[in-house]
Amino acid sequence: GEGSTRREPRSRAGSAAPGGGAAGGAAPIRPPRRASEPNSRPGNPAPRRPSTQRGRTASAASLAATLGVSEPYAEVALDVASGVLDEAAALVLEHQAYLSERLRADAAAGTPPAAPTLGVAEAVVQANPNLEGSEMSVRRHLARLHRSGRLSRMSWNSMTAEQRSQVFRVMLEDVAENGRRAR
């Protein structure tokens, strides 16, 4: 009541503990946050990484919808970007700029046009419509990856889903490597 002298136990922060505190009248003690926990440092949030397969699938679907790319392409971009959504988005967007840069470099070097890749270039452009109009650059990119041994020559229709994902992976890893060299 009003005249009561009973005081509520206080937590470490100095406010009244809800529900009268823990057993024995003491406020519950929380273990300190470990530095490895996300957002453990104020103003320095951890990169957005989906922690579960469901979260990763949702992130890939979100990336695909936002950037207008196929979900398999978005999933590979997330893998190449170590699950960091913002980095995956930047990688997808960087692909077109990389191809434009390569086309200029190849043209300046007099590199011959690439041999047809049996539907692979068209499938890559379909998976990432941001590359429309860059089909010749996609073909040159694929040819360079074939010559280096990073990709084998197969028609898109004869590839398994895993082999198709590997085409996206090798291309996007090449884009990422080029981005790291440029920095």
Image (spheres, rainbow, N blue to C red):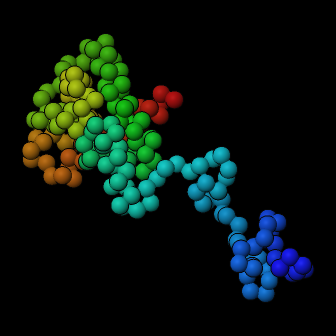
Left or right of 108 in this view: 46: right
Above or below, comparing residue 160 to residue 149 in the picture: below
Residue 149 can be seen in this image: no
Report x, y in % for residue 92.
35, 36
Quadrant of the snapshot with the N terminus: bottom right
Report x, y in % for residue 135.
20, 25
- Quarter of the image where one finds residue 13: bottom right
Left or right of 19 in this view: 131: left
- Quarter of the image where one finds residue 8: bottom right
Q: Nearer the viewer, residue 65 or 180?
A: 65
Q: What residue is shown at x 81% (from left), y 72% (from top)? A: 10
Left or right of 6 in this view: 158: left
Q: What residue is shown at x 14% (from left), y 27% (from top)? A: 115
Q: Nearer the viewer, residue 157 or 34?
A: 34
Q: Nearer the viewer, residue 43 or 172?
A: 43
Q: What residue is shown at x 61% (from left), y 59% (from top)? A: 36
Residue 6 can be seen in this image: yes
Report x, y in % for residue 96.
32, 27
Q: What residue is shown at x 79% (from left), y 66% (from top)? A: 15
